[in-house]
Image: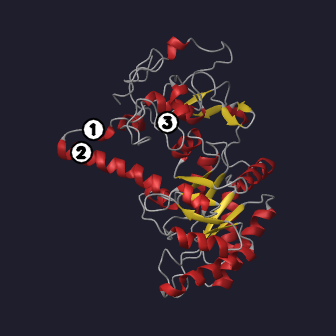
Amino acid sequence: MPHSGPAPCLRQRIGGDNVVPYHQVTHGVTRMDAFAASLRIGETPPGRCSRGMEVPTRSLLLTTIWLVQYPRGMRSDDGWQSAEARPAKGATMDRQASQARAERFRQLHRDGMLVLLNAWDAGSARILEAAGCPAIATTSAGISWSYGLPDGQQLTRAQVVEVVERITRSVSIPVSTDIEGGYGETPEVVAATVRAVVEAGAVGINLEDVPGAAGEPLVDVPRQCARIEAARRAADELGVSIVINARTDVYLLAVGDPATRFEHTVQRLNAYREAGADCLFVPGVRDATTIGELVQAAHGPLNTVGGPGAPPLAELRRRGVARVSLACRLAQAAFGLVQRGAREILEHGAWQTLEGSPTAAEMNALMAGRDRFWDTRQGAINEQQIVATDNYMSPTVGMLDAR
């Protein structure tokens, strides 16, 4: 019978003393095929509003999961592995697997312009993977907001590593991590941060040149180069050839005379490339002509930010941009939906903002990673047993939207 209310700690015992956390256990889900197939970048699921993927309804965040007697599969390149095959939290990373993901991520930068969408937790990462992303990056702003903090060097290394570990355990695609300024000034501290995120499963990093010392907006070039070199050595010592995306905030922070910003930016980009950066990131530039000139002047692949106000992807591709990140844009949209929905409910007593969101069944299917039960003892469970309506009622799951 279904649970009568949310359990404070959901977990299921799978044979003997092997306790599997609830997020590693599958449950009844259907109607996933059309939904997952429609979750492609730039498309809207059938029957959904034109806003596309939006934050799930409140019930999806409070739903009680009906646990079943077998572990959920883990997605891998060659099929599904059992949950027991997934490394336990805190286990030594699989360096061979990490290096394979790093090489895959590196190759994506050679196969044409990479559109890299940004997640802030395991759930958003799963959504992006299902949408067809070949790789994802994290957004430090989104992670900060999820902790209830403002963006801008407010996170600790431990907080970032915790999120990275959850994300990399939830997806099979390469994950690049925004480590902001490295969570410390010295090359040694940056190296320690890189070791921590690589051991958590990341195969790429963003390292920015802020904040500078003594009130300066930017870290001086020699010191930033030393920090990049330390990041490279730290990853190499772990046997993982991570992709280092070196970011300069000359334009974003409007550093110096506008007439000197282009030359200042190019100087920094090329010094960072020489220090070992694989990709060069310049946020804050929206003019297509300037972006094209940076592509020509930089000695390595250029990363820019996409989203409202930026040139279309086709134009960025034509200008020779190698990588386009969304930064915090998706997180902004998600948190903005919560804000608009709350205001509409509290001020107008309506909930049109919430219409068009995925159903609880669709979200649970997405997080489970497949479209139906699979019991290794009995084979596939009869599909009628796991049909979920828009109100999310089924014989196996029960009515959960009331939670």
Helix, strand or loop status at disc 3: loop
Pick the front one: 10 or 389: 389
The x, y position of residue 239, in whole percent, is 81, 58
Label 3 or label 1, whichever lies nearer to me, is 1
Kindly tell me whether residue 125 is visible in this rendering: yes
The relative height of residue 232 versus residue 376 in the rendered view (above or below) is: below
Q: SS of the residue at dot 1?
A: helix
**107 lies left or right of 177:** right
Q: Residue at x 48, y 77 (%)?
A: 253
Amino acid type, callout 2: Glu
Disc 3 or disc 2, which is closer to the eye?
A: 2
Which badge, 1 or 2, comes first in the chain's sequence? 2
Taking depth in this image into account, of 172 and 290 the one nearest to the observer is 290
State the SS at label 2.
helix
Q: Return the x and y of residue 331 as percentages of the image width and height.
A: 45, 53
* Quadrant in which residue 308 is drawn: bottom left
Query: In terms of depth relative to the viewer, which is nearer, 296 or 370?
Result: 296
* Residue holding disc 2: 344
- In this rendering, does residue 215 appear at all? no
Pointers 1 and 2 in contact (C-beta within 8 Å): yes
Disc nearer the start of the sequence (3/2): 3
On the image, numbered disc 1 is attached to which residue? 352
Report the residue at 68% width, 14% height from top: 377
Specify the quadrant of the image occupied by residue 160: bottom right
For the C terminus, the quadrant is top left
Please give the residue where the numbered disc 3 appears in the rendered image.
9
Seen at 56% across and 36% down, the residue is 23
Marks 3 and 1, Cα distance to the nearest angstrom?
A: 33 Å
Which label's residue is closer to the chain start, 3 or 1? Answer: 3
